[in-house]
Image (cartoon, helix red, strand yellow):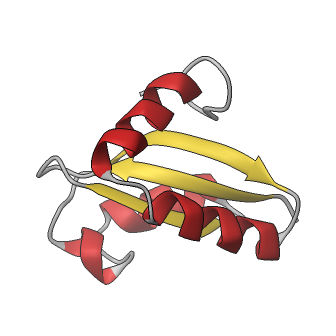
Amino acid sequence: MNWVCYVLLCADGTLYCGITNDLDRRLVVHNAGDGAKYTRGRVPVRLAYCESCADKSSALKREMEIKSLPRMKKLELIEAGRDVFCCRSL
């Protein structure tokens, strides 16, 4: 399985970080309002950043690292990732 850690830009301008092994399906679930509790009232969401991880454990660790960053650092990661790590464009 190919795990990814991703960051979403929610409709209210907030950021959400999560992991999945099926990014396309997960984005559909988030936008249907059936994803994480946090994103349910903040749809539509757009993929802002994602990076591949070796396995679920490393994806979880990376998710925690990103979640611990202040908002400005997350935005810097998103901007830097557009050229390096982003799985899809906005």
**x and y percent of residue 32 in the render?**
31, 66
Question: Residue at point 29% right, 82% down?
Answer: 37
Question: In the picture, residue 68 is in which quadrant?
Answer: bottom left
Q: Residue furthest top?
A: 83
- Quarter of the rendering containing residue 29: bottom left
Quadrant, the N terminus = bottom right
Identity of the residue drawn at 17% across and 62% down: 42
Choose between 67 and 30: the one closer to the eye.
67
> Looking at the image, which residue is at 57% across and 63% down?
65
Left or right: 26, with 2 as reference point? left
- Relative side of 70 to 11, left or right: right
x, y percentage for residue 84?
67, 23
Q: Closer to the camera, 51 or 27? A: 51
Between 63 and 34, which is closer to the camera in this rendering?
63
Q: Across the whole image, how many numbered discs are drawn on residues? A: 0
Q: In x, y percent, where is residue 80? A: 53, 24
Front residue (pair 80, 33): 80
Q: Is residue 37 left or right of residue 84?
A: left
Q: Residue at x 42, y 31 (%)?
A: 76
| Quarter in which the C terminus is drawn | top left
Across and down, in percent, residue 7 comes to 46, 51
Up-down: is 9 above or below 63?
above
